[in-house]
Every structure is written in C-alpha cells, then in structure tokens.
Image (cartoon, rainbow, N blue to C red):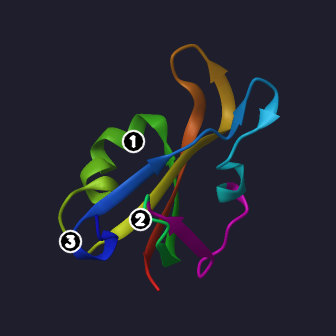
Amino acid sequence: ADLTAAGGASVFAGHVNWRGATGPFAELWDEKIGGAITVVDVRGKTWRYKISQLVTVHKNDLPQRADELFGPSGPHRVVLVTCGGRWVGGPQGYEENRVAIADPA
C-alpha cells in the first residue's frame, strides 16, 4: 500500500528491551524533534518521515490519549511506541510509554 495515500496514524510498537538485550525502539528515549525515520514497505520502497512530537505518557493516562496519539483521523503520520521509565512489573511492566510522531518528510 502507498503509505502516503492513507490518512491517520500508522502505528508501530517495539520493545525497549527483551530478555536482557536492548530492544529495537530503545533509541526513542534519546531521539530529538526533527529526527529522521525511514520505513521500507514490502516492495522495497522507502518512505521518509521527520519526528514532529515526542511524548512521554504514564500508562494510566494512555487510554485517554489513545485517539489523539494513534487515531485514524487527521493527516497521515507514523507513530512509534515503546515502553520505559520505572519498571513496576506485573502486567503493566514499565510505568511509561514513549511515543514518537513523525510526519512525511
């Protein structure tokens, strides 16, 4: 599918760490506004995005902000999500989520 033709958010979630190893989205905690994100589709076409927002959300606040951050309305954007902050264990795992929102470059 043509990523730029769709409206709303294309959401990608990834681990901050896994079984003692650094996860693929750990770098979201060090990313800056204006950072580049590249997505390669199944046909090998490259899509480029620039980070416009970095949001740290407490897990308890995520449901109320889900439509704002991940919703299907608005212009096309890529949203990357990972966990982090303090480890609290149980089903919650980490206390926070890091969300990077990127617009077509």
Secondary-structure class at tag 3: loop
The residue at 70%/49% (across/down) is: 26
Q: Amino acid at mark 1?
A: Asp
Residue 96: in magenta span? no
Q: Amino acid at mark 2?
A: Val
Label 1 sits on residue: 61
The residue at 65%/57% (across/down) is: 28
Which mark lies nearer to you, 1 or 3? 3
Which mark lies nearer to you, 2 or 1? 2
Closer to the camera in the image, 37 or 71 = 37
Q: In the picture shown, does residue 14 fall above or below 91?
A: below
Q: In the picture shown, does residue 91 fall above or below 100?
A: above
Secondary-structure class at tag 1: helix
Q: Amino acid at mark 3?
A: Gly
Which mark lies nearer to you, 2 or 3? 2
Label 2 sits on residue: 78
- Give the distance between the C-alpha atoms of the residues marked 2 and 3, in whole angstroms: 12 Å
Neighbourhood count class around disc 3 (C-alpha, 10 Å): few under 14, some 14–19, many 20 upward: few
**Where, by quadrant of the figure, is residue 101 drawn?**
bottom left
Outermost residue on the front side: it is 43
- Give the distance between the C-alpha atoms of the residues marked 1 and 3, in whole angstroms: 21 Å
Which label belongs to residue 41? none
Instruction: Confirm or deny contact between disc 2 and disc 1 (CB under 8 A).
Output: no
Q: Position of residue 25 (x, y in %)?
A: 64, 50
Label 3 sits on residue: 74
Q: Give the magenta part as a residue range.
A: 29-41
Q: Quadrant of the N terminus?
A: bottom left
Q: Earlier in the sequence, mark 1 or mark 3?
A: 1
The residue at 20%/58% (across/down) is: 72
Q: Position of residue 23 (x, y in %)?
A: 71, 41
Secondary-structure class at tag 2: strand
